Image (cartoon, grey):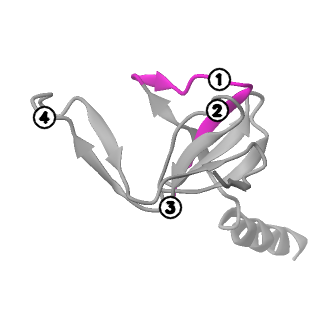
Amino acid sequence: MKYISFVMILMLCTGCIRHYSTYRYDNGEDYVQEGIIRIVNDDNGKIGYATAEGVIIIEPQYAFGYPFANGRAKVTYSGMQKTVADSHGEYHYWQSDEWFYIDKQGNKIEE
């Protein structure tokens, strides 16, 4: 009986665990900038941020997000990924009308 209870709890909790990957950039893992890397939620593709050691500091919630520079990162909740013309599908860029900046705690920076 104990074994069945343990298996049931394990099965229930497994669905609760979030799975993140390091954001892929230039055919490899994201570069550490200012001690921070971008991460991606494996389920929905949202971008967040973690320390170089893997400690999540900003949960994945952004459609697109640039690396941190000068203590801030440019992010957006919505937008589209588009292909660069004449790149034969190799290069892409993000387009959004709703970009804003966040600090390292995820707070929106007013400009």
Residue 20 is one of the magenta-drawn residues: no
Give the tally of numbered discs: 4
Disc 2 marks which amino acid? Ile
The answer to whether mark 3 and mark 4 are in CB contact below 8 A is no
- Depth check, mark 1 against mark 4: the one in front is 4
Q: Are marks 1 and 2 in contact (CB under 8 Å)?
A: yes
Badge 1 marks a residue whose secondary structure is loop
Residue sitting nearer the eye, 50 or 106: 106
Distance between mark 4 and mark 2 Cα atoms: 28 Å
Among numbered discs 1 and 2, the one appearing first in the sequence:
1
The kind of residue on which mark 3 rests is Tyr
Residue occupied by mark 1: 32
Which residues make up the magenta segment? 26-43
CB under 8 Å between discs 1 and 3: no
Task: Characterize the local packing of mark 4: few (<14), some (14-19) or many (20 or more) Cα atoms within 10 angstroms.
Answer: few
* Residue 97 % position (x, y): 38, 59
Mark 3 or mark 4: which comes first in sequence?
3
Give the residue displayed 70% in from the left and 60% down from the top: 17
Give the residue number, with chain letter if any, for mark 2.
37
- Residue 85: image tag: 4
* Residue 77's disc number: 3
Distance, label 3 to label 4, CA atoms, is 25 Å
